[in-house]
Amino acid sequence: MSYLDELATAGHHHRGLIAHLDAGADHVGVYPLGDDTIGTLRTIAAAVVEARYEYR
């Protein structure tokens, strides 16, 4: 799998994570999340999604 393929896959999964967090989730899988962790995950996920579109 190429870097771009991996980035496309990551972008897809990270969009799902953003939607999950935006829906008010306070966990990912069985892992509870605090407010700081949710903010950090959302920031990272958004950066991956943005990078995906920049490399298309």
Image: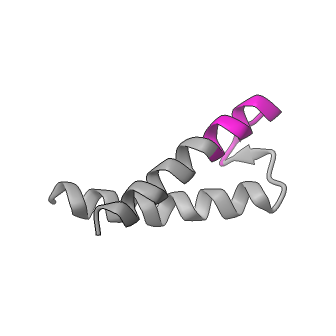
For the C terminus, the quadrant is bottom left
Question: Which residue is farthest left?
Answer: 2
The residue lying at 61 percent from left, 43 percent from top is: 43
Q: Residue 33 versus residue 14: which sits nearer the camera?
A: 14
Q: Residue 39 versus residue 29: which sits nearer the camera?
A: 39
In the image, taking residue 2 as reference, residue 15 lies left or right, namely right
Q: Position of residue 29 (x, y in %)?
A: 65, 48
Residue 43 in the image: above or below residue 3: above
Q: How is the image coloured?
A: one colour
Q: Position of residue 20 (x, y in %)?
A: 71, 60
* Residue 53 visible in the displayed image: yes
In the image, taking residue 25 as reference, residue 49 lies left or right, namely left
The residue lying at 39 percent from left, 55 percent from top is: 51
Q: Position of residue 37 (x, y in %)?
A: 70, 32
Q: Which residues are magenta?
A: 29-42
Is residue 17 within the magenta segment?
Answer: no
The residue lying at 23 percent from left, 61 percent from top is: 4
Q: Residue 56 versus residue 17: which sits nearer the camera?
A: 56
Is residue 36 within the magenta segment?
Answer: yes
The residue lying at 39 percent from left, 66 percent from top is: 53
* Residue 34 visible in the displayed image: no
In the image, taking residue 8 as reference, residue 12 lies left or right, namely right
Q: Position of residue 28 (x, y in %)?
A: 67, 47
Quarter of the rendering containing residue 32: top right
In the image, taking residue 55 as reference, residue 38 lies left or right, namely right
Residue 34 in the image: above or below residue 38: above
Residue 29 in the image: above or below residue 9: above
